[in-house]
């Protein structure tokens, strides 16, 4: 078991414990070449093989990487380097890079075109969200069920903490009587949800997105294993979870990605709602402290909405203003009429249930604190 102190960054500790190989000179060289010309896109990320081998105490003889580039683009990128490229599975988007006798398997993002249940016809894509849809249900639902069952069989007294999402509520929050203000959508102060959406909101009769549906399945199983088997389980339904080490991408982690665009002087695209959509944001430190409180005094089959609440929230337009004030630079952006499927116009979490159960916990980081930390971290990594 890992014990996290308040003085240590949770994400830095995770990197140090599980991803120490990410600092090797070979990895740095490969990612440096891949990032050249990537502009607004995240060019590549680690995927599961190296982590799986570390956890099972096996020798890490290869590192798996996913990339937005097609196999032929990868070959072109490395042709003038001292890195050998092997066409190990080029038809399926996989190549093996060899540097200093170390293997790095790199696979292009894919999306399913058709499937018969066991086999799928795929096409290459540079969209991380489309690629992740191929695995969302397997990881979120099936993976969570496997963990629950193994916990029940081998360590039933363990505390099981599941990171769910506000996407379990689907687009029901968009049915709220919202008022359009100059910089945000808002709800009347007299409305029952003015202080945020609580856990009584229905998850039925709404569009969740495929990701949200996979989380619903896992969320319900976490609660059920608690209620049915008496296990100490909890589902934390988070809004935007962020912090200084957040690697934001175009469609995920909007604060981190906006800050990244500002620091790198890139244009940001606002998808729908005139940029007035509201999100609460919770700092990773505050979230992990909430997990720790539950771990110390666990309950059975619980569920909590968790987020920045009224204490830490903003619209995209308001975030742009804060970023400009903090950096002194003009923020470049454009507005698209297209919005994401199942996206929320307004989301603020009502965290009073959790605070009632754990009064020793409170939020420490406001929205400006969070943005400031993210920008400072990005500046250091330049």
Image (tube, helix red, strand yellow):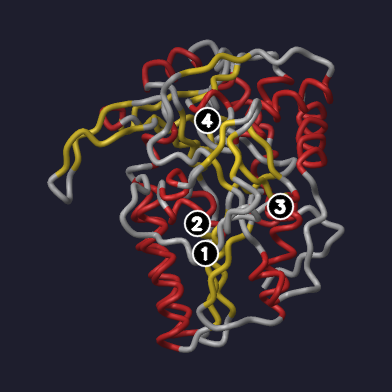
Which residue: 39% across, 72% down?
221
Report whether residue 27 is seen: no
Q: Residues within 10 Å of mark 2 (few under 14, many from 20)?
A: few
- The N terminus - image quarter: bottom right
Q: Which mark is residue 294?
A: none
Q: Which mark is residue 56?
A: 1
Mark 2 residue element = helix
Which of the marked residues, 1 or 3, is nearer the chain's N terminus?
1
Front residue of 49 and 363: 363
Q: Is residue 64 left or right of residue 280?
A: left
| Closer to the eye: label 3 or 4 | 3
Q: In the rendering, at what x and y percent does residue 121 appear?
A: 19, 35
Which of the marked residues, 4 or 1, is nearer the chain's N terminus?
4
Q: What separation in Å lies between label 3 and label 4 (alpha carbons)?
A: 23 Å
Q: Which residue is mark 3?
A: 284
Q: In the rendering, at what x and y percent does residue 327 appear?
A: 82, 21
Front residue of 22 and 100: 22
Q: Residues within 10 Å of mark 3 (few under 14, many from 20)?
A: many
Front residue of 75 and 231: 231
- The C terminus - image quarter: top right
Q: Is residue 76 above or below residue 283?
A: above
Which of the marked residues, 2 or 3, is nearer the chain's N terminus?
2
Is label 3 in contact with label 4 (beta carbons under 8 Å)?
A: no
| Closer to the eye: label 4 or 2 | 4
Q: Which residue is mark 2?
A: 52
When asked about the image quadrant of residue 302, the answer is: bottom right
Is label 1 in contact with label 2 (beta carbons under 8 Å)?
A: yes
Q: Which residue is mark 4?
A: 44
Q: What separation in Å lies between label 1 and label 2 (alpha carbons)?
A: 6 Å
Which residue: 83% across, 22% down?
325
Q: What separation in Å lies between label 4 and label 2 (alpha carbons)?
A: 19 Å
Mark 4 residue element = strand
């Amino acid at each position: 078991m890992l014990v996290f102190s308040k003085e240590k960054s949770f994400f830095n500790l995770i990197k140090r414990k599980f991803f120490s190989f990410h600092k090797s000179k070979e990895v740095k060289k490969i990612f440096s070449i891949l990032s050249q010309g990537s502009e607004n896109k995240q060019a590549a990320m680690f995927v599961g093989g190296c982590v799986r081998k570390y956890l099972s105490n096996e020798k890490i003889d290869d590192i798996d990487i996913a990339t937005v580039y097609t196999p032929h683009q990868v070959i072109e990128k490395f042709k003038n380097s001292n890195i050998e490229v092997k066409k190990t599975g080029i038809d399926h988007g996989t190549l093996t890079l060899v540097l200093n006798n170390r293997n790095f398997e790199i696979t292009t993002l894919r999306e399913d075109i058709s499937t018969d249940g066991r086999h799928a016809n795929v096409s290459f894509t540079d969209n991380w969200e489309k690629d992740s849809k191929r695995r969302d249900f397997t990881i979120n639902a099936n993976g969570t069920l496997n963990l629950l069952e193994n916990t029940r069989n081998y360590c039933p007294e363990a505390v099981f903490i599941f990171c769910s999402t506000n996407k379990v509520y689907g687009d029901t929050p968009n049915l709220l009587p919202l008022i359009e203000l100059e910089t945000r959508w808002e709800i009347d102060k007299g409305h029952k949800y003015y202080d945020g959406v609580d856990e009584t909101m229905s998850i039925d009769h709404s569009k969740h997105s495929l990701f949200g549906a996979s989380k619903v399945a896992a969320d319900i199983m976490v609660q059920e294993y608690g209620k049915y088997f008496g296990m100490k389980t909890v589902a934390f339904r988070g809004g935007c979870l962020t912090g200084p080490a957040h690697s934001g991408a175009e469609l995920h982690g909007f604060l981190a990605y906006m800050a990244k665009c500002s620091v790198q002087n890139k244009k940001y695209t606002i998808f729908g709602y005139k940029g007035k959509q509201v999100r609460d944001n919770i700092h990773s430190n505050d979230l992990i402290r909430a997990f720790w409180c539950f771990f110390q005094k666990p309950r059975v089959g619980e569920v909590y909405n968790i987020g920045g609440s009224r204490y830490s929230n903003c619209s995209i337009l308001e975030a742009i203003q804060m970023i400009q004030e903090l950096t002194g630079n003009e923020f470049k952006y454009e507005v698209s009429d297209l919005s994401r499927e199942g996206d929320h116009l307004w989301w603020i979490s009502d965290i009073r249930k959790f605070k009632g159960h754990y009064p020793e916990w409170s939020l420490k980081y406001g929205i400006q604190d969070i943005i400031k930390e993210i920008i400072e971290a990005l500046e250091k990594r330049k």
